[in-house]
Image (tube, rainbow, N blue to C red):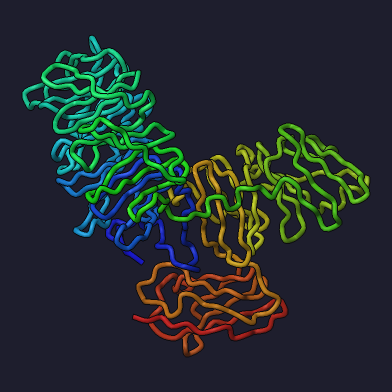
Amino acid sequence: MRAFFLGIFIGLFSIPCSGQIGTWRTHFSYLNAKDLAIVNTHIYCATENGFFYFDKQAQEAIKLSKLDGLSENQITKLAYNSDTKKLLIAYQTGMIDLLSLDNQDEPTQISPISLLRDANGILGSKAANHIAFKNSMAYLAYDFGLVVLDLTKQEIKETYQNLGENGASLSVYKTVFANDSIYLSTPIGIRVARASATINLQYYGNWKTLFTKHTTIAENNNELYWIDGTGLLYQYAKGISTPITQVGSAISSIEKGSDANSFLLCTGQSSSILSLTTQNSTLLLGNTIKQPQKALQDNQGKTWIADKQMGLVSNFTGVFKSVSPSSLDTLYSVRKDSILTDEEGNKWIRQGSGQGLMVISPKNQVVYLYTGKGAGNLPSNTVKSMCLDKNGQLWVGTDKGVAVFDYPPSVFTGKTFDAYTPIFEKRRLLGTETITSIAIDGGNRKWIGTKNGIFLFTSDASELVSNFTISNTPLPSNEISYIGVAGNTGEVYIRTNKGMVSYTGTATEAPSEQTNVKVFPNPVKSDFTGLIGIEGLTENAYLKITDATGFLVYETRANGGTAVWNARTLSGNKVATGIYFIFSMNAKGEDTLVSKIAIIQ
């Protein structure tokens, strides 16, 4: 397993390793690719919510995310600058990461640049449309203009706005340097200015319009090429545009090929290589080329395609195939909380928006539950989620908070059957939140998803255990779609509107007997800062941890079948190196030696 970013790793997160409590994993889709950058034998690829690089020599795909120190998840554009050996990563929000690479083209350090993201004076989209380089300067095209980033000083040098006629606001789609000039593809055509230190490019008067129609532009052999609306390719040299060949009317991407006299073209449905020498196009064929967004060639002439359906696609081994990493992104995408069955076989069904709940008995009796006392007492008739906890209570999430039916089977007793609203901090539990999902872990704790993150409560919701948001976790979004818990491992799978992540929680389903107790990690290094897990305990067991002399250093209670210890004493001090014994006490008050654990230097 490769180690990278460790020097700048964010302390809020833990390095993922199998079974380690409190760690996160990403499960983004790596098939909806949108951009790529080639760095010798490494090909970096961004998808809608994922990011990875493929090592040609090892033939291995390595995933990268916020867990590895990246600032965000939603990447819009990538580009590599060989002069500074930096990969520029532009995000949807305007955030920029400069990823430094070592001599093996592996990631080593990230330098985040947040000035653009935090600039309140820029209205509209801050998603980059294109990245170009001039020596150690990066030129980022945006809807609001052009941003010049000094890669050496790692700071924004200049911003060009209002470059339209008479200083009008103007979007920039792409930037090209050729013939000592800078060319911009814009909605009003190609804007051009001399690329000279003596020219003030921030002044619109120093720019002129070459062509008045929106065109696709590119550079080859220091000459400008452009494609008009009919798909005709032109070469622009010495002030004259010369038609070259017809290439198609829907070109979405044009990039220079490894051959100095070729272009790679993408239409969104196909990809081809155009030879400027023969003026012929060769269509790239393969079952894995579905919706190509961008194509590049490496120094061996092999083609790499960012495909919206198939991910990173290449013919580097012969035929075109996808080399994107696998993903669990579709796991838990099918909701399991629309219909629930209580212990007497009654089916609880979430109705449509504003229609409350419907309950059907095994004898086909039907009851409808709504807001109002005597009618169900729901906080709202829009029910978004349901779950049955370990005590048989039905927890209901609505767009106005949470309600609980204490004993669901009594719905057909003929008596008034109302839900109650849990109270937390003297107010209705999450009464101002839209509850999008509720899940139960092995300790009967409630994982409640909202449009503002996740709230983890104790079993009766009297205490907030944790609040997970994008600010303190690798969550790609605060808008939670669904939560599922794998009871045997305690892993919590969280689907958001921007992809799925999982968290190794501190609670698992408890076995009936303590026959296979595991302590991990074991041994523990003295500088370990995570949580030690004790798994395989009986339900909610009490634990006492002593040193070798029998002195009590810590005690706690399990959540379901798992307990955790932070390797500290009851007073909060780190324990010394040595051997420690773990004892558990079940509901009958029986003491059982569970295991021993070593703390080492």
Tell which residue pokes out farthest to the left in this image: 198
User: Which residue occupies 52% across, 62% down?
Assistant: 504
Quadrant hosting residue 262: top left
> Would you say 140 lies left or right of 491 here?
left
Count the labels in the image: 0
- The image shows residue 506, relative to residue 395, as above or below, that is below
Q: Between 372 and 129, which is closer to the camera in this rendering?
A: 129
Report the quarter where the C terminus lies.
Answer: bottom left
Q: Between 131 and 505, which is closer to the camera in this rendering?
A: 131
User: Which residue occupies 61% across, 61% down?
Assistant: 486
User: Which residue occupies 14% across, 22% down?
Assistant: 237
Tell which residue pokes out farthest to the top in this image: 166
User: Which residue occupies 53% across, 70% down?
Assistant: 564
Q: Where is residue 330 in the image (x, y as percent from the top left)?
A: 56, 50
- Whether residue 121 is visible to the viewer of this picture, yes or no, is no
Tell which residue pokes out farthest to the bottom in this image: 549
- The image shows residue 485, relative to residue 158, as above or below, that is below
Report the quarter where the N terminus lies.
Answer: bottom left
- Whether residue 536 is visible to the viewer of this picture, yes or no, is yes
Q: Position of residue 559 (x, y in %)?
A: 61, 66
Q: Between 69 and 557, which is closer to the camera in this rendering?
A: 69
Quadrant hosting residue 155: top left
> Would you say 440 lies left or right of 69 here?
right
Q: Position of residue 178 (x, y in %)?
A: 15, 28
- The image shows residue 345, relative to residue 193, as above or below, that is below
Q: Where is residue 23 in the image (x, y as percent from the top left)?
A: 46, 61
Q: Between 293 and 589, which is closer to the camera in this rendering?
A: 293
